[in-house]
Amino acid sequence: MSTLHTYPEKIAVLRLAPGADVPEWAESSSLFSITATATETSVVCAGRSVPTKVPGDRGLTGFALADEAPSAGVLVELLTPLAEEGLSVHTVTTTTTVWVLVPATDAERAAEAWRRRGHTVAPAPVD
């Protein structure tokens, strides 16, 4: 089974206009990501400085798959228990890490759903 690390800062997933520049208030956190498509620019960043008028989801808790590169089936393994709980999620993957973001109000429910499936959920190590 997998180990997931939970991070203390609250993360935001925001929708900006297509082609938008990265705003100055978009602070990096344990996860910082920019994705641009023809229809939108999405920014995943620390939520502490985001203006209230910017649309998106705020107050998210980030869980990162620890010590394991994304592999076939890993998203299904992580998301199925959350779907069964009816939890909303955002996911971000890098070449080495899978991130699952859930509303902070649902973070403990997500952790318990994973634990019931045999996963370990622990605070992220402090550098």
Image (cartoon, rainbow, N blue to C red):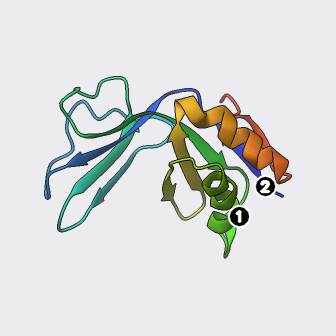
Residue at (37, 29) in percent of width and height:
47
Residue extending farthest top: 48
Query: What residue would you read off at disc 2?
Result: 2
Quarter of the picture holding the N terminus: bottom right
Question: As shown in the figure, which amino acid type bears the numbered disc 2?
Answer: Ser
Indicate left or right for 119 with 85 as reference: right
Label 2 CA crowd tier, 10 Å (few <14, some 14–19, many 20+): some
Q: Residue 87 at x, y = what percent?
A: 56, 47
- Taking 78 as reference, is 116 left or right? right
The one nearer the camera, 120 or 89, is: 89
Image spot of residue 6 (x, y percent): 65, 36
Label annotation for residue 77: 1
Res 13 → quadrant: top left
Query: In the rendered structure, which disc, 1 or 2, sits on the residue that comes first in sequence?
Result: 2
Q: Residue at x 18, y 64 (%)?
A: 39
Cβ atoms under marks 1 and 2 closer than 8 Å: yes
The answer to whether residue 70 is seen in the rendering is no
